[in-house]
Image: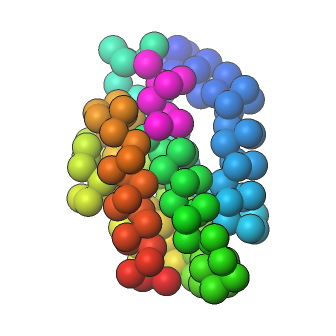
Amino acid sequence: MGLKENRFTKTFQEEQFPELKAQINEAAGFDVTLNIEWSTLFEDRFLHLYNDSYPKIYFLPIIEAFKSIASDDMGKEALAESLKEIHILNTKDHHNPANGFTFSDGVLTIDHSPILNAPDVNSRIKVLIDLLENNL
């Protein structure tokens, strides 16, 4: 990561990330461990779009899926007992969440392009809900 990416990451982590993390924890009902490989979430030509795309691609789908899953005590317990960590990265530039979202050994992995199909939040929410409901 170069200086531009480091500056952007620091600003995002200080300005937007705390509220998104708080919303994830609130939706889940516990403090969720997030392992984010920030250095993989960049393509230089799209740096100006990440303030909008990061929440839509990575965080809002998690928040909304957790709200759905943890809407009752059974879902809250299943999520708390099964989810150890969320791992966010971009290694394969997946833009289809069916290919980029996995849940194994308590780790929810979101390996998705930081920019492709950003407006399609609802499809990512649906895939996450289905994935978690089938594996918790």
The image quadrant of residue 18 is top right
Question: What's the residue at 49%, 83% (across, down)?
Answer: 136
Question: What's the residue at 53%, 45% (across, down)?
Answer: 60
Colour pattern: rainbow
Left/right placement of residue 53 relative to residue 112 reads right
Q: Residue farthest to the front? A: 72
Q: Nearer the viewer, residue 111 or 52?
A: 52
Q: Position of residue 49 (x, y in %)?
A: 44, 19
In the rendered image, residue 50 lying in the magenta stretch gets the answer: yes
**Relative vertical location of residue 60 with respect to residue 47 in this rendering, above or below:** below
Instruction: Using the rendered image of the protein, determine whether residue 65 is visible from the camera's viewpoint.
Output: yes
Q: Position of residue 31 (x, y in %)?
A: 75, 64
The magenta stretch spans which residues? 49-56
Q: Nearer the viewer, residue 85 or 40?
A: 85
In the rendered image, residue 1 lying in the magenta stretch gets the answer: no
Q: Position of residue 120 (x, y in %)?
A: 33, 39
**Relative vertical location of residue 66 with respect to residue 136 in this rendering, above or below:** above
All told, the count of numbered labels is: 0
Q: Is the magenta region chiefly helix, strand or loop? A: helix
Left/right placement of residue 136 relative to residue 93 reads right
Question: What's the residue at 64%, 27% (across, down)?
Answer: 12
Left/right placement of residue 134 relative to residue 23 reads left
Question: What's the residue at 29%, 33% (across, down)?
Answer: 116
Q: Position of residue 134 (x, y in %)?
A: 38, 81
Instruction: Using the rendered image of the protein, determine whether residue 37 is visible from the camera's viewpoint.
Output: no
